[in-house]
Amino acid sequence: MNPLFHEVFQKTRLLSKELNLVLKEYDLFASQWTVLYCVHQHEEMILTNIWKYLNVEAPTITRTVSRLEELGWLKTYVGKDRREKVVRLSEEAVAKFPMIEASIIHFENEFLKGLSNEEQVILRGLLKKLDNERSE
C-alpha cells in the first residue's frame, strides 16, 4: 500500500472523530453535518442530488435525511415529479446553523493551524488534482 493513502485514511479518520466531538454538543454526527451543510449551501436539494454531490450511496443518504427529519433538522416534501423528494433545512436548523458553523470554523482553524495559508491552498489544489485525474 502506498504510504500516502495510509496517511490520508488516518487523517480522514482523525478528522471525522474530532469533528464528531465538536458536533456532540448539537446531537449531530459528521455525516449528518455534511448533509445539513450541503442542503444549506443549495437552499434546497433533491435527494438524488445530495447523494451524487456527496459521493455516498443513496440508501445511506435516505436514512440520514430521514433521521435528520425525525430530529427536526430537515423538512422534506414531494417535488415536481412525485418520485422526487426535496429537502430543505427546518426553521429551527436555519436558526441554529450560524452557531454550529462557528463551532466548525473554530475546529477547522485549530485542526489546520500547523499549515500556512499557502500550504492549505497547495494541499487543496493537490486534492482537487487527484479528483480531476480520475474524471479524465
Image (cartoon, helix red, strand yellow):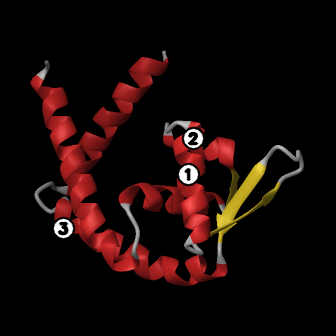
Residue drawn at x 41%, y 68% is: 28
Mark 1 vs 3, N-terminal side: 1
Report which residue position mark 3 lands on.
110
Residue drawn at x 79%, y 61% is: 77
For the residues marked 1 and 2, what is the alpha-carbon distance in whole angstroms? 6 Å
23 relative to 58, above or below: below
**Of the pair 54 and 27, the residue shown nearer to us:** 27
Residue 101: image quadrant is bottom left
Secondary structure under the numbered disc 2 in the rendered image: helix
Secondary structure under the numbered disc 1 in the rendered image: helix
Q: Residues within 10 Å of mark 3 (few under 14, many from 20)?
A: few
**Of the pair 74 and 63, the residue shown nearer to us:** 63
For the residues marked 1 and 3, what is the alpha-carbon distance in whole angstroms? 31 Å
Residue 26: image quadrant is bottom left
Report which residue position mark 1 lands on.
63
Residue 33 in percent (x, y) is at 44, 62
Which quadrant, please, contains the N terminus? top left
Residue drawn at x 38%, y 62% is: 29
Residue 49: image quadrant is top right
Indicate the amino acid at tag 3.
Glu
Nearer the observer: mark 1 or 3; the answer is 1
Kindly indicate whether the residue at mark 2 contacts the one at mark 1 (C-beta within 8 angstroms): yes
Residue 89 in percent (x, y) is at 63, 69
68 relative to 51, above or below: below
Q: Which mark is residue 96?
A: none
Residue 88 in percent (x, y) is at 68, 64
Indicate the amino acid at tag 2.
Pro
Indicate the amino acid at tag 1.
Arg
Kindly indicate whether the residue at mark 3 contacts the one at mark 1 (C-beta within 8 angstroms): no
Report which residue position mark 2 lands on.
59
Q: Residues within 10 Å of mark 1 (few under 14, many from 20)?
A: few
Residue drawn at x 74%, y 55% is: 86
